[in-house]
Image (cartoon, rainbow, N blue to C red):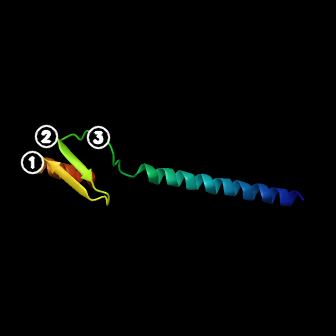
């Protein structure tokens, strides 16, 4: 009877551990996704640059010059 209780405690502990590890993995991966809405300040720009995404996620960059456009493209990637 004691062995059965011990085995049950070990299995429950492993199940809880697996659930916590899965949740931690999900949260870590979720945090690595890019921010798609709002405004963000990017250092190194001479003028304003606007980054837009369409419904398919395709990026469009509007910038005043090539250097700012390249900087914005690097930020997107």
Task: Specify whether 9 is left or right of 51.
Answer: right
Quarter of the image holding residue 44?
top left
Q: Residues within 10 Å of mark 1 (few under 14, many from 20)?
A: few
The residue where tag 2 is placed is: 47
Q: CA distance from mark 1 to mark 2?
A: 8 Å
Q: Residues within 10 Å of mark 2 (few under 14, many from 20)?
A: few
Q: Residues within 10 Å of mark 3 (few under 14, many from 20)?
A: few
Q: CA distance from mark 1 to mark 3?
A: 20 Å
What SS does tag 1 mark?
loop
Residues 62 and 14: in front is 62
Nearest to the eye among marks 1 and 3: give it: 3
The residue where tag 1 is placed is: 65
Q: Residue at the location (20% across, 49% down)?
A: 72
Rendering coords of residue 26 (x, y %): 51, 54
The residue where tag 3 is placed is: 39
What SS does tag 2 mark?
loop
What SS does tag 3 mark?
loop
């Amino acid at each position: 009877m004691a062995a059965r209780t011990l085995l049950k405690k070990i299995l429950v502990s492993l199940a809880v551990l697996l659930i916590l590890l899965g949740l931690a993995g999900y949260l870590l991966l979720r945090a690595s996704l890019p921010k798609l809405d709002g405004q963000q300040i990017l250092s190194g720009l001479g003028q304003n640059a606007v980054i837009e995404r369409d419904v398919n996620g395709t990026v469009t960059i509007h910038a005043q010059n090539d250097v700012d456009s390249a900087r914005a493209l690097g930020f997107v990637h």
